[in-house]
Amino acid sequence: MENSQIVLVVDDTPGSVERVAGLLESAGFRAHTAQSAGAALDAAHATEPDIVVLEPLMEDGWEVTAWLRRRDGRGPALVALTRGPWDVSDSRAAGFDYLVMKADDPQTLLAAVALCASPFDSNDGDGFSS
């Protein structure tokens, strides 16, 4: 099933962006990748993603998060994908819509991205796994 949603995957861990992008593409999303903060900002300008899956603990990850949240007053939906240590309150305070731990089942990430892509997502739950 083809999906018109563009997802930017940002992580500086070797191989991580390719695995996550492949998972998202197999679910029908259009995935783009970046492995550094600078590449993430360039890709965000070029692709105007609907959703960003980001490792916030990568070098300058917080700065990317802040920039994405300021962009056009709203910016894309943000999914934190991290090993931690991190908690839900930190994620919400940083502006993330969902928190997924890298050790979680890949279906958890797909569910978070799908919720971001849903036009009916009111995000009136806590919006965070783990």
Image (cartoon, rainbow, N blue to C red):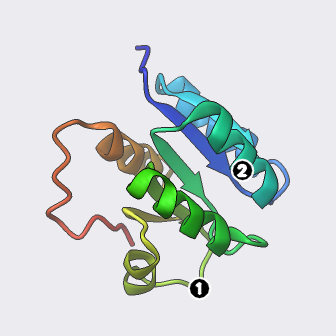
Do the numbered discs 1 and 2 sit on residues whose CB atoms are within 8 Å? no
Q: What label sits on residue 8 in the rendered view?
A: none
Q: Residue sitting at 55 percent across and 69 percent down?
A: 66
Tell which of 10 and 62 is nearer to you.
62
Percent of width and height locating residue 26: 54, 25
**In the image, which disc is placed on residue 85?**
1
Q: Nearer the viewer, mark 1 or mark 2?
A: 2
Q: Can residue 73 be seen in this view?
A: yes
- Within 10 Å of disc 1 (Cα), the crowding (few <14, some 14-19, many 20+) is few
125 relative position to 41: left or right: left
Which image quadrant: the N terminus? top left
Which quarter of the figure has residue 99? bottom left
In the visual, does 13 lie left or right of 40? right
- Where residue 13 appears, as percent x and y from the top left, is 80, 59
Which residue is drawn at the image coordinates 23% and 70% (left, top)? 126
Q: Name the residue under label 2.
A: 40
Pick the front one: 69 or 86: 69
- The disc, 1 or 2, on the residue closer to the chain's N-terminal end is 2
Which residue is situated farthest in the front direction here?
72
Give me the residue at 26% from left, 37% from top: 118
Horizontal side of 43 relative to 1 (left or right) equals: right
Q: Which of 58 and 37 is in front in this view?
A: 37
Where residue 111 sits: x, y (%)? 36, 46
* Residue 50 higher or lower than 71, as above or below: above
Q: How far apart are marks 1 and 2 (CA)?
A: 23 Å
- Visible residue check, residue 104: no
User: Which kind of residue does numbered mark 1 sit on?
Assistant: Pro
Residue found 44% across the figure and 76% down from its top: 91
